[in-house]
Image (cartoon, rainbow, N blue to C red):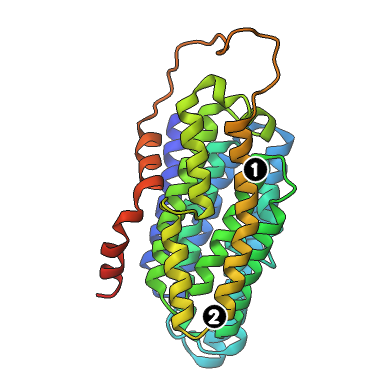
Amino acid sequence: MNPYVLTILLSSLGLGTVLTFASSHWLLAWMGLEINTLAIIPIMAQQHHPRAIEATTKYFLTQATAAAMILFASTTNAWLMGEWEIHQLSHPLATTTVMLALALKLGLAPVHFWLPEVLQGLELTTGLILSTWQKLAPFALMIQVTPTINSPLLVAIGLLSTLVGGWGGLNQTQLRKILAYSSIAHLGWMVLILQFAPSLTLLSLSLYIIMTSSAFLTLKTNNALTINTLATSWTKSPTLAALAALVLLSLGGLPPLSGFMPKWLILQELTKQGLPLSATLAAMMALLSLYFYLRLCYVLTLTIYPNTLTATAPWRLNFTMITLPLSIITILALGLLPLTPAVTAMLTL
């Protein structure tokens, strides 16, 4: 893609998200979401591959449907209640419609079916943008409308997403689909605690972005798209393979890695709010996700890909990829747990 065109598209991507962040009026927020969607579509379709075009079409249709639902809900609220402000969303029909539309934009269960299929058709860099940056604008709106949404609805969507995210990834061999189901499960944890502690949702979102970025960049560096190709990572770069296994365990939420912090604090807060059953169900569903992370770790560290070479490392050219962003993000994805007391102190301020 032409660098100038790419610069314009990435600038529009940033502009759409910032516009949604800064808006207090539904029409302005809707415009930001639309700019965001229209900017990423050419980036998704740049491969000129039938799979990429199919993924782009599916993404466009789902996002257009969600945007139309948001416009319908905000217009309904303005018609019935006389308010266009995001904070003044008060009619039950409008609040429920907006919640479902934002769930569709994010890929939350039960409207998650597009996310694994779309992510599977994209290259890893575009998939990283879709899994991280594209979640920010809908989450900003969701945090603003949360006080008016029915609490059991949010808890139900959160628990269902953690279940679907764990269950759907069990039988997958494609790494992008596994990361898509991982995304659904993590978003479920964020929605679960959204109404009780929005600050914890933001903490979870930040750590999710760090860990997912590290996972995508590691797979891109190894040029791995399936579990079978992941098994060759050890001969290419043993250090990166060991770190990739730790990043996957961090995504699974194992201590003493960074991913344990949000799960620990969310379970603690749910128990404080008098929801021990929801906390227990969420913890049990996290075990499903942990299983497929452990499966990937097993392939990475304990299997050797069958080949006919007697040498331990295959012949390869000098490595030219820039690895500084990957190094920084991996350190953050693995070593933030000791900062938990400082984080909890900041959250209680």
Classify mark 2: helix, strand or loop.
helix
Instruction: Give whichever of 133, 262 is nearer the camera.
Output: 262
Classify mark 1: helix, strand or loop.
helix
The image quadrant that residue 185 belongs to is bottom right
Q: Please, is residue 222 above or below residue 168 in the view?
A: above
Q: Earlier in the sequence, mark 1 or mark 2?
A: 2
Mark 1 residue type = Arg
Mark 2 residue type = Pro
Residue ID for mark 1: 295
Q: Is residue 58 visible?
A: yes
Q: Position of residue 164 (x, y in %)?
A: 68, 62
The image quadrant that residue 322 belongs to is top left
Q: Which mark is residue 276?
A: 2
Residue 217 is left or right of residue 44, and the answer is: left
* Separation (CA) of disc 1 from disc 2: 29 Å
Q: Please, is residue 251 above or below residue 162 in the view?
A: above
Few, some or many C-alpha atoms within 10 Å of disc 2 (few <14, some 14-19, many ≥20)? some
The image quadrant that residue 46 belongs to is top right
Q: Residue at x 29, y 57 (%)?
A: 339
Quarter placement of the C terminus: bottom left
Q: Position of residue 343 (x, y in %)?
A: 30, 64
Q: Position of residue 298 (x, y in %)?
A: 62, 37
